[in-house]
Image (tube, rainbow, N blue to C red):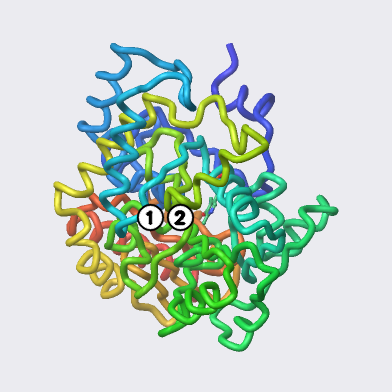
C-alpha cells in the first residue's frame, strides 16, 4: 500500500520546483496537524482563503445543513435556490449602493474572465489595461492580464488588445483612453508582494476611467473578505469600482468566486448573444451556504476591528537587520529580505519549528504573512518568536 506522499509524487501533477511536501491530516483554527503529531501554525491561510480559520464551526454547520437539503441543481435562470440568492443579497449589503448584481463562479480566475467579458460587452470596446506585477489568474484570459512576462511567454499568443501600465504611476494614467473597455487592478497587489496604492492614486485612476468611459474593475480576490481590516480593501480609499471580483476567502474554505456590478452593467450580458456567460458549478449551494456563514462570522465576531492591532503585533516583533521592510494593509503582509536564497532558508527552517509561511509569485524575496484573522495575540507572539529564531539561525 503506497502512502499518500508516494501516491502524490507519482500521480499528482506539479508545477512547482519547490514542493513543500508537508503532510497534513487535519486543520483547525490557525493550526494544521501532521500524521505524526506535528503542529504547524498557518500564517498563509491557503493564500488568503481561511480568513475565518480552518473549519470554523459556523461554516461547518452551514455546510452540514445544506448537505441535508441538496447538492447541485442548476443555478442560472432555471431553479431558484436560497443559498446563492441570500448570499447575493448579503454581499450587496456589504457594498456601496447600486453595486448589487452578483454573478457566481467557482474560482478567482473565472471571476476575472467574467468581469472582462462583461466590460467588453457593456462598453463595446476591446482594450483591457492591467498593471506591472499584476496577478489575476491562470486561465488564458486572466493570464493575459498578469504583469509578469516570464509567466506568459510560453503561452503566447494570448488575448489581443491587452496593455500594461506601471502601478502607482500617475503619468501612465493618460494611456487609459476612449478605446479602453476596462482597467483591472488589485486594490492591494498581492503576488507583487503587497503593493499598496500611493496616496491619491486610486482616486486619480477612478477619475480617469470615468472621464474616458472605461470601466474600473477592482480585483479583491486576495484583498477582500476582511483580509485588510475592512470587508473590502477599497473601503479604505475614496473609490467605488464598476465591477468587483472576489473568490478565495469568500468561501471560508469552499471554492467559490463572483463578479459583481450594477444591474445596468450586468444586464449587458443578457443581450444578444443570449448566453453572455455560463457556468455549471458557479453558485454551488454548498459553497454559497459556506460563504454566507463566513460573511456573517466576519460581521459578527469583531474580527475586522482587531486586524490593525494584530498587524502591529507582528510588526513590533519582526525586527532584525535582515528584514529590509514590512509592507502591509491589515493582515496582508510582506516581510522583505535581501534574496530568495535567504528567504527560502528562513521559510524552511520556520516550518521545522512549526510555522508555515511562503513567498510571493512575483516577489520571491518577501515573506508572505496572511494568517487567519482569528489568530490570537499569544499565537502571534509564538509565531513571531519562531520566525525570529529561524532568522537568527539562517542569517549570520
Ligand atoms: N486575482 C488575484 C488578486 C489572486 O491573488 C488570485 C489567486 N492568487 C487570482 C486572481 C486567481 O484566483 P484562482 O487561483 O482562484 O483562480
- Few, some or many residues within 10 Å of mark 2 (<14, 14–19, 20+): many
Residue ID for mark 1: 224
> Foreground mark, 2 or 1?
2
Q: In what element is the residue under mark 1?
A: loop
Q: In what element is the residue under mark 2?
A: strand
Q: Residue at x 76, y 56 (%)?
A: 152
So how many labels did they put on this image? 2
Is residue 226 depicted above or below 212 in this figure? above
**Where's residue 138, x and y in %?**
65, 47
Q: CA distance from mark 2 to mark 1?
A: 10 Å
Is residue 125 depicted above or below 287 in this figure? below
- Few, some or many residues within 10 Å of mark 1 (<14, 14–19, 20+): many
Label 1 lies in ligand 1 vicinity (Cβ under 8 Å): no
Q: Residue at x 69, y 25 (%)?
A: 10
Q: Residue at x 44, y 52 (%)?
A: 261
Along the line of sight, which residue is nearer the eye, 75 or 59?
A: 75
Residue 339 visible to an observer of this rendering: yes
**Where's residue 160, x and y in %?**
79, 57
Q: Of the residues under marks 2 and 1, which one precedes in the sequence? A: 1
Relative to 301, is 45 on the left or the right?
Answer: right
For the residues bearing labels 2 and 1, Cβ distance under 8 angstroms: yes
Is residue 379 depicted above or below 320 in this figure? above
Relative to 252, is 241 on the left or the right?
Answer: right
Q: Residue at x 29, y 43 (%)?
A: 53
Residue ID for mark 2: 244
Along the line of sight, which residue is nearer the eye, 190 or 312?
A: 190
Along the line of sight, which residue is nearer the eye, 332 or 296?
A: 296
Q: Residue furthest bottom?
A: 171
Relative to 28, is 279 on the left or the right?
Answer: right
**Where's residue 302, x and y in %?**
15, 53
For the N terminus, the image quarter is: top right
Amino acid at each position: 500500500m503506497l502512502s499518500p506522499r508516494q501516491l502524490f509524487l507519482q500521480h499528482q501533477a506539479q508545477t512547482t520546483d519547490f514542493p513543500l511536501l508537508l503532510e497534513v491530516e487535519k486543520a483547525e483554527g490557525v493550526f494544521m496537524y501532521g500524521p505524526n503529531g506535528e503542529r504547524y501554525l498557518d500564517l498563509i491561510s491557503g493564500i488568503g482563503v481561511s480568513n475565518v480559520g480552518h473549519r470554523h464551526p459556523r461554516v461547518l454547520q452551514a455546510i452540514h445543513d445544506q448537505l441535508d437539503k441538496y447538492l447541485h441543481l442548476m443555478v442560472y435562470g432555471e431553479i431558484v435556490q436560497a443559498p446563492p440568492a441570500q448570499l447575493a443579497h448579503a454581499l450587496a449589503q456589504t457594498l456601496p449602493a447600486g453595486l448589487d448584481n452578483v454573478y457566481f463562479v467557482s474560482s478567482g480566475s473565472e471571476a476575472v474572465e467574467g468581469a472582462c467579458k462583461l466590460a467588453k460587452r457593456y462598453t463595446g470596446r476591446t482594450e483591457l489595461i492591467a498593471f506591472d506585477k499584476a496577478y489575476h489568474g491562470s486561465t488564458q484570459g486572466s493570464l493575459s492580464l498578469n504583469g509578469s512576462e516570464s509567466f506568459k511567454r510560453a503561452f503566447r499568443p494570448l488575448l489581443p488588445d491587452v496593455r500594461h501600465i506601471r502601478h502607482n504611476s500617475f503619468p501612465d494614467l493618460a494611456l487609459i483612453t476612449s478605446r479602453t473597455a476596462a482597467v483591472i487592478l488589485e486594490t492591494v497587489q498581492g503576488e507583487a508582494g503587497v503593493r499598496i496604492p500611493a496616496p491619491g492614486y486610486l482616486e486619480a485612476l477612478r477619475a480617469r476611467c470615468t472621464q474616458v468611459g472605461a470601466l474600473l474593475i477592482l480585483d479583491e480576490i486576495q484583498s477582500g473578505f476582511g483580509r485588510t481590516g475592512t470587508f473590502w480593501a477599497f473601503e479604505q480609499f475614496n473609490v467605488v469600482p464598476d465591477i468587483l471580483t472576489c473568490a478565495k476567502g469568500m468561501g471560508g474554505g469552499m471554492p467559490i468566486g463572483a463578479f459583481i456590478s450594477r444591474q445596468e452593467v450586468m444586464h449587458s450580458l443578457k443581450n444578444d448573444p443570449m448566453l453572455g456567460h455560463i457556468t455549471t458549478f458557479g453558485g454551488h449551494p454548498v459553497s454559497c451556504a459556506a460563504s454566507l456563514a463566513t460573511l456573517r462570522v466576519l460581521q459578527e465576531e469583531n474580527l475586522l476591528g482587531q486586524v490593525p492591532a494584530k498587524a502591529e503585533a507582528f510588526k513590533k516583533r519582526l525586527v532584525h537587520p535582515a528584514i529590509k521592510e514590512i509592507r502591509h494593509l491589515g493582515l496582508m503582509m510582506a516581510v522583505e529580505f535581501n534574496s530568495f536564497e535567504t528567504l527560502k532558508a528562513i521559510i524552511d527552517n520556520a516550518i521545522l519549528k512549526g510555522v508555515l509561511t511562503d513567498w510571493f509569485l512575483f516577489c520571491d524575496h518577501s515573506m508572505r504573512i496572511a494568517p487567519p484573522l482569528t489568530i490570537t495575540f499569544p499565537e502571534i507572539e509564538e509565531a513571531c518568536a519562531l520566525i525570529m529564531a529561524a532568522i537568527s539561525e539562517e542569517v549570520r
